[in-house]
Image (tube, rainbow, N blue to C red):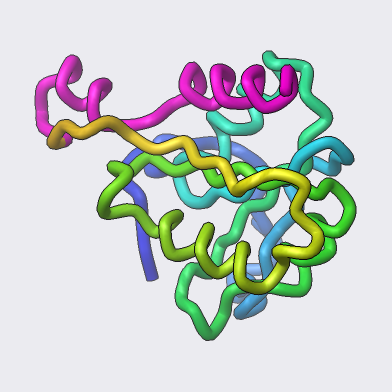
Amino acid sequence: MLEHVDLYTATGQAPVEDLDHCIPPGRAAVRRPGAELTVLTYLAMVGPVLDAVQSAGVDAEVIDLRWLDRASLDWDTIGASIRKTNRVLIAEQGALGTSYGGWLADEIQRRHFDWLDAPVERVTGGEASPSISKVLERAAIAGTGEVITKLTEIAGS
């Protein structure tokens, strides 16, 4: 189980009546339906991505992967979205070279190449180490602004 420290103060809907609630293994969640672009994200980037999609005015389908291990990735949901939109953006906080998205982009190209109208795009953090300095942390981690920039770029092409 992964816990992201940025989610500790997050608020939102929760299954308060069911103390035994469990997310079904291997099931992604479509957080926003759309037809122009599929945005795959996870953990603390879900909120910034949803904000960015709204700000950019792009009709993007946002999928919260929720399960990141290779055996539990929800390829059915991902594939259905790609067949609908034909474009993919992977948004994550981590640096380009060490990110989960590199493997994910490669696997999407392999599995869904015939459905893609463009290469898989990625939004990642910068080449800086996250630290206790807010300035350095901001330089290291991708956020809403970076996603808006990439969404606008994709929508304009």
Q: Nearer the viewer, residue 80 or 108?
A: 108
Among the 4 quarters of the image, the one containing residue 150? top right
Image side of residue 30 versus residue 67, left or right: right
Q: Pick the quarter of the image with the N terminus.
A: bottom left
Please state the horizontal and vertical placement of residue 119, each as a whole percent of the image.
62, 47
What's the residue at 34%, 53% (across, down)?
Answer: 99
Is 32 situated left or right of 141 in this image?
right
Q: Position of residue 113 (x, y in %)?
A: 71, 64
Count up the numbered dots. Answer: 0
Q: Residue at x 45, y 55 (%)?
A: 101
Q: Please tell me whether residue 67 belongs to the stretch shown in magenta.
A: no
- Residue that lies at the very extreme toward the bottom in this rendered image: 71
State the residue in front, 4 or 79: 79
Q: Which residues are magenta?
A: 130-157
Tell me the quadrant of the picture where the C terminus can be found. top right
The residue under the point 61% across, 64% down is 108
In depth, the one of 3 and 124 nearer the eye is 124
In the image, taking residue 144 as reference, residue 102 lies left or right, namely left
Measuring 63% from the left and 20% from the top, which residue is drawn there? 153
